[in-house]
Amino acid sequence: MQLLSPYIRLYGPFDVNRYCPYFSAGGAYFIEFNWIIYVVIPDFKPACSGRSFTLTEESWASTLGGMCGRYRRRSDKQRIAEAFSVRMDLEELYLEPEDDIAPGSMQPVVLENHAGERAIELMRWGFKLPDRLLFNARSEGIEQASFWKDSFHERRCIVPADAIFEWQVAEPGRKKPKYEIAVPGREPFGMAGVWKLWKNPKTDRWERTFAVLTGEPNELIQPIHDRMTTILEPHDYAQYLAPAPRPPIHLLRILRAEEMTARLSKQADQHEAQLDLFSSPTTDN
């Protein structure tokens, strides 16, 4: 098994008895918590004895296939509809602003429906597979990736956000600086996304589920992280959503650094598991 994403900080305490049974492989321990599969580094390997164990802010872990991402959406439904030229009736759509959006939650996305009209729909963020939670898709090669290519060809969507949160890699024992990344003048901006039907193992029902695309970072983000959310230009929204004989790979550009801001927000709360969006698990399959 491969640990896909380094330097993810967990905080405790976590009750081992509550999260067992878990399984182990290659000396790493896997705990499922709130739809997320955590891989605990061997230095903090617990025994499943009913005791509690603590992973402090100095603790480090990696995740196999699932980690938590964070973004903010304060724009209401009217503002989203205006920004993305949605003219559907919004009366039955209920949205509250959210400052800490995480995978597994239901979030609004913009798509083109079967009638060819732009619409806002609520979908679940992330695909819970047997061995991982997927909520990002790599822009590079997505048109050929077996898991994502059908969605990118036929089921593209735009995910509204007002800011993205990113925790910069730091040395073990040091707090990870938290950055709030925004696109001034675009509130909300549009993150490139894809969606597909997914069977929720908890309800045994099929749901519409989405993932956010990521790509190479620009010079503003590169010192913070080696991946960056793929943010669409407003004049590309229509082409990205519209059906096309060839998928719009050319729209998955790296947003220019001068169009973005990265503001140091605060240090991570020691009582929360703050895990980043850009390095979330992806698959090239």
Image: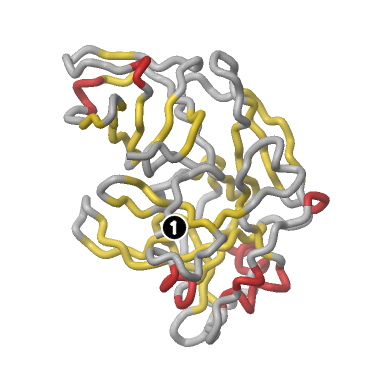
Q: Residues within 10 Å of mark 1 (few under 14, many from 20)?
A: some
Q: Where is residue 199 shown, x and y percent of the image?
A: 25, 61
Instruction: Left or right? Give the position of 260 relative to 146.
Output: right
Res. 25 image quadrant: top left
Residue under the image location 31 percent in, 27 percent down? 28
Q: Where is residue 75 shown, x and y percent of the image?
A: 62, 54
Instruction: Left or right? Give the position of 37 relative to 248.
Output: left
Dot 1 amino acid type:
Asp
Res. 21 image quadrant: top left
Determine whether 94 is above or below 45 in the image.
below
User: The N terminus lies in which quarter of the figure?
Assistant: top left
**Which colouring convention does the figure follow?**
secondary structure
Q: Nearer the viewer, residue 2 or 49?
A: 2
Residue under the image location 47 percent in, 69 percent down? 144
Residue placed furthest toward the right: 258
Any part of residue 92 in sight: no
Residue under the image location 62 percent in, 57 percent down? 230
Res. 268 image quadrant: top right
| Residue ID for mark 1 | 284
Instruction: Left or right? Give the position of 30 relative to 192.
Output: left
Q: Nearer the viewer, residue 201 or 43?
A: 43
Secondary structure beneath label 1? loop
Any part of residue 259 in sight: yes
Q: Where is residue 20 shown, x and y percent of the image?
A: 19, 27
